[in-house]
């Protein structure tokens, strides 16, 4: 989905729940606009639910090595929030993005949406 073409195509405050799952591979530059759009289309008092994984919990040395290569390749491509390439670190950024986007869109209003942020490992 090209987020540059979405804004305005969906009515403002159109949904009681806005759900996104396993989208942590968006480049960091896309996230502020994406979260802002989620807030725009959610009804006041609605639910914004983000579920993400970091994929790095295993007791398998082979899978651990594969994860290391995977995360490092995303870091090198600029598709990660990680400074060291050990994971994507998207889950750590979800709540701050929601707060920041809300303050930019509605600086004089408190956050009226129920925000559910869940991170999980495999």
Image (cartoon, grey):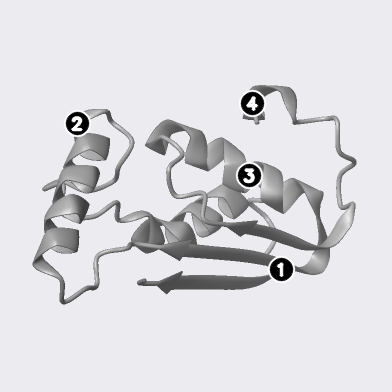
Q: Return the x and y of residue 13 as percentages of the image width and height.
A: 86, 52
Measured from the top left, where is residue 110 in percent x and y? 66, 66
Q: Are marks 3 and 4 in contact (CB under 8 Å)?
A: no
Q: Quadrant of residue 80?
A: top left
Residue 61 as seen in the image, left or right of residue 66: left
Classed neighbour count for the residue bearing mark 3: other residues with Cα under 10 Å, few (<14), some (14–19), many (≥20) = many
Which label sits on residue 2?
Answer: 4
> Which of the two labelled residues, at mark 1 and mark 4, occupies the earlier sequence position?
4
Front of the two marks 1 and 4 = 4
Q: Which mark is residue 76?
A: 2
Q: Which is nearer the eye, 43 or 69?
A: 69
Q: Earlier in the sequence, mark 3 or mark 4?
A: 4
**Residue neighbourhood size for the residue with mark 4, other residues' Cα within 10 Å, grouped as few (<14), some (14–19), many (≥20):** few
Distance of mark 1 from mark 3, alpha carbons? 13 Å
Q: Residue at x 16, y 77 (%)?
A: 59
Q: CA distance from mark 1 to mark 2?
A: 35 Å
- Using the numbered discs, state the Cα–Cα distance from disc 2 to disc 3 in whole angstroms: 26 Å
In the picture, residue 77 is in which quadrant? top left
Residue at numbered disc 3: 36
Q: Secondary structure at mark 3?
A: helix
Taking the spot 11% from the left edge, 48% from the top edge, the residue there is: 84
Left or right position of 109 against 21: right
Looking at marks 2 and 3 on the same chain, the residue that comes earlier in the sequence is marked by 3
Q: Residues within 10 Å of mark 1 (few under 14, many from 20)?
A: some
- Point 62% across, 70% down: residue: 115
Q: Earlier in the sequence, mark 1 or mark 2?
A: 2
The N terminus appears in which quarter of the rendering? top right
Instruction: Give the foreground label among 2 and 3.
Output: 2
């Amino acid at each position: 989905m090209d987020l540059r073409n979405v804004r305005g195509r969906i009515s403002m405050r159109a949904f009681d729940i806005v759900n996104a799952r396993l989208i942590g591979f968006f480049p960091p530059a896309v996230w502020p606009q994406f979260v802002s759009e989620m807030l725009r289309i959610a009804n006041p008092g609605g639910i914004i639910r983000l579920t993400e994984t970091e994929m790095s919990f295993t007791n398998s040395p082979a899978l651990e090595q594969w994860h290391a290569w995977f995360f490092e390749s995303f870091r090198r491509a600029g598709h990660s929030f990680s400074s060291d390439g050990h994971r994507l670190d998207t889950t750590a950024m979800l709540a701050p993005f929601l707060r920041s986007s809300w303050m930019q869109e509605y600086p004089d209003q408190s956050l009226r949406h129920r925000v559910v942020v869940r991170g999980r490992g495999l």
